[in-house]
Amino acid sequence: MMSKQTAIILILVVFLGALGALIYFYFSFNAFKPTVITPVQIDTGVYDPFGTITSNTPVPATDAPIIDAIPQVVSINKLRQISTDPISGFSVIEDTKNQRTNVHYILRANGNIYEVYTNSLEVKRLSVTTIPKVYESVWLPNGTNLIIRYLQDITNNIQTFSVKINPATTTLNEFEGGVDGNHLTENIATLSINPAGDKIFYLTNSLNGATGYISKPDGLNKKVLFESPLIEWTVSWPKESTITFTTKPSAGVLGFLYFLNSQTGSFSRILGNINGLTTKTNDASTEVLYSDSIRNTPRIYLYNIKNGEGKLLPWNTLPEKCLWSNTDDKIVYCAVPNTFPMGDYPDAWYQGLVNFSDSIWSINTDTMSATLVYDINKESNNKIDAMNLQLDKNDNYLFFMNKTDLSFWSLKLK
């Protein structure tokens, strides 16, 4: 049996051993404790809408100046597709207040109207009013009034509606308004707006022939200005006193161009006896671009009304694919097909039997020198059959529709 003295000694040894172990671990832990290094925060560049990504940039003191972020520069391609959806027409408006060019266009499928800008990729919807299957739109110069044309579902009669774009009626979206207006006569065959934008001229057909009316854009103050036993006409109104009449073209039919005086009603012949005749008259009504159809290719000429002389231009295209410069009356811009498929022109093009792949050219009608402005297919890999060409006031941009799919495009010229 263990003596009392032996037990005391054993307890003392255990106590001292435990105490020594505690002292050893205490000093060992503090002597070799690792240094804690805060990991460097890396800016991943990932967009975080909730702001949870930590930056290694120190937060400035409240009295330190904060440097504004550099604004992002938006890159806009030289050739820009404004709308992939088919449109039925557009208007180019000069916004002098904001020193930019605005463009309004209307979708073919639902009649919604949009606004875009040459210096921005922003798109604003101006109207949410649904008007199905708008086949054609003719715009007044102000860009907020237009005339739309569509087929009535039941009767298939041509409906013509004079429209005004209204501002938004809700503060939830200041850009989405509506439209209102009134219907004009049913089955208008063709119409055009005067340069001032306060009158329209339109034709209706009957068994007795065509009757031409002049009125306000809303159809009020209508009066008869023209009557003819012929009904196959296309009209335009390039000059306040001049309305042009061109017989509807076909390759095997002789065509004629006439001028109607909008004040007196006098009717005078300008050109005639030309196969497949299509025309485009300049704003001064002093020159006419016209085409004839020879051996499956439309040739284009410039006709001087005063001296009766015509010049054959150095490339083949249709007048409908051309327009005069707004800054130089001797410069003409044209969309020129790179090749012409076999067919009777202009019939095959109007009927959609052929489509072109165009390049944009300019020509000086004094020197007859031609300059390639943009080869669409080569430079952008797009095949565009351009129609409804328009320029801004300073010839900085050319706007057009692609006849193949009715998409909407712009080309920066300067």
Image: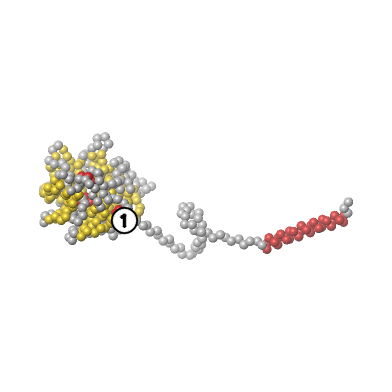
Could you tell me which residue is drawn at 12 percent across and 48 percent down? 272
Left or right position of 46 against 184 = right
Question: Residue sitting at 23 percent across and 55 percent down?
Answer: 333
Does residue 112 lie above or below 121 as drawn?
Answer: above
Q: Which image quadrant is residue 35 in? A: bottom right
Q: As shown in the figure, which amino acid type bears the numbered disc 1?
A: Glu
Q: Position of residue 81 (x, y in %)?
A: 32, 51
Asked whether residue 174 appears in the rendered view, the answer is yes
Residue at the limit of the structure toward the bottom, as seen here: 64
Residue projecting furthest to the top: 154
Query: In the image, residue 375 lies at what x, y percent?
Result: 28, 55
Decide which of 132, 370 is in the foreground and name it: 370
Q: Position of residue 27 (x, y in %)?
A: 70, 62
Residue occupied by mark 1:
379
Q: How many marks?
A: 1
The residue positioned 65% from the left and 61% from the top of the image is 33
Q: Which residue is located at x 37 percent, y 57 percent?
A: 74
- Residue 147 in percent (x, y) is at 24, 45
Task: Name the colouring of the figure.
Answer: secondary structure
For label 1, count other residues whose C-alpha is less than 10 Å away and answer few (under 14), some (14-19) or many (20+): few
Whether residue 199 is visible here, answered yes or no, is no
SS label for mark 1: helix
Quadrant assignment for the C terminus: bottom left
